[in-house]
Image (cartoon, rainbow, N blue to C red):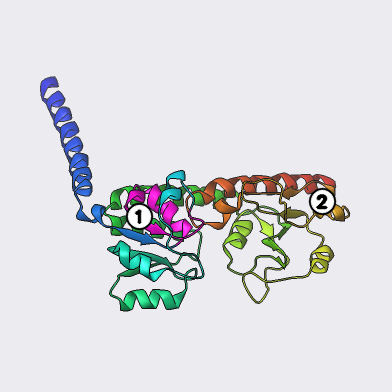
Amino acid sequence: MKKVTMFVSKLVAVLAVLLVSGVTFAESTNPKQSHRFVVLAPHIVESMYAIGAGHQIVGTTDYADYPVEAQQIPRIGNYARIQIERVIELQPDVIIAWKTGNPPDDLARLQQLGFEVVYSHPEQLEDVASELKMLGQLTGRSQTAEQIATDYLSELDTLKRKYANATPVSVFYELWSRPLRTVAGNAWPQQQVALCGGVNPFMDAAEDYPQIGLESVLEQQPQVIIQPTQHGESAIDGITWQDYDYLSAVANGFIFHPNSDKVHRMTTRMLDELSILCTHLQTARDFYAQQDK
């Protein structure tokens, strides 16, 4: 009986290995893995590399700088203009564009020329997962993309549940200093602030990235100020908040500098900075709770 049991166990193990190997082999021999892509936004480039398809990118736009290997990809334009002649020279199988971040007239021209244009259009934090799956299908890497997407949603859900009932703390988000702009509505950073239990006094502005006056911020007396910078350091061109030491955020040292690339790009790396942001807001929350006692 023991021999039969051992035989069955070994058979199951072998079948499991064959099943996984079969899926892996099918994916590795998928002809889509040899397709050439022009990718027109930094966040799409990051996600392509995340699923193992970065080497299929033959052209991209300015500021697509992560991972380091992406810096070697030929540049064919920026958010304002695409060099259509260069795209024609590269002859990509597919162009992946950012629906709200690329010039629509150039994209329309490329479609008229017969190029297949697929759009990235993440609007909610959860959409990073669906974007990964879409890229997995395009590049023949669905299995890898599905796993990364599942892990991403799991980590995001953990953060959501952790701060779902957090005591509100008022937050001002300095998106840009000249002119002074913040976030509101459904803006990508606004969703992150809200998830962490932050309350934005400009949440109900008419647009997602409104221009505001400094006086309006000072009147609101925010408990926390978020000032994203490229490498998470002090902002050289940002507002010098230390000049306004009567603000609660300034007086108590709650000015935080998250990495702008991580928080502003719709990729899995956003979770790293989001977790840190939530921790910072919790520190401020605990401090103010003690002050109120």
Residue 39, by quadrant, is: bottom left
From the image, state whether disc 1 or disc 2 is nearer to you: 1
**Label placed on residue 143:** none
Q: Nearer the viewer, residue 194 or 218?
A: 218
Residue occupied by mark 2: 250
Where is residue 254 shown, x and y percent of the image? Answer: 76, 48
SS class, disc 2? helix
Which residue type carries mark 2? Val
Name above or below for residue 141 compared with residue 13.
Answer: below
Q: Does residue 268 appear in this view? A: yes
Under tag 1, what secondary structure?
A: strand
Vertical arrangement, residue 108 with respect to residue 12, above or below? below
For label 1, the residue is 57
Residue situated furthest top in the rendering: 2
Give the residues in magenta.
41-64
- Point 71% across, 68% down: residue: 202
Tell me residue 155's x, y (percent). 49, 47
The tag earlier along the polypeptide, 1 or 2, is: 1
Report how far apart the C-alphas of labels 1 and 2 lie in the structure.
44 Å
Say few, some or many: other residues with alpha carbon within 10 Å of mark 2 (under 14 / 14 to 19 / 20 or more): some
In this orientation, which residue lies closer to the viewer: 280 or 137? 137
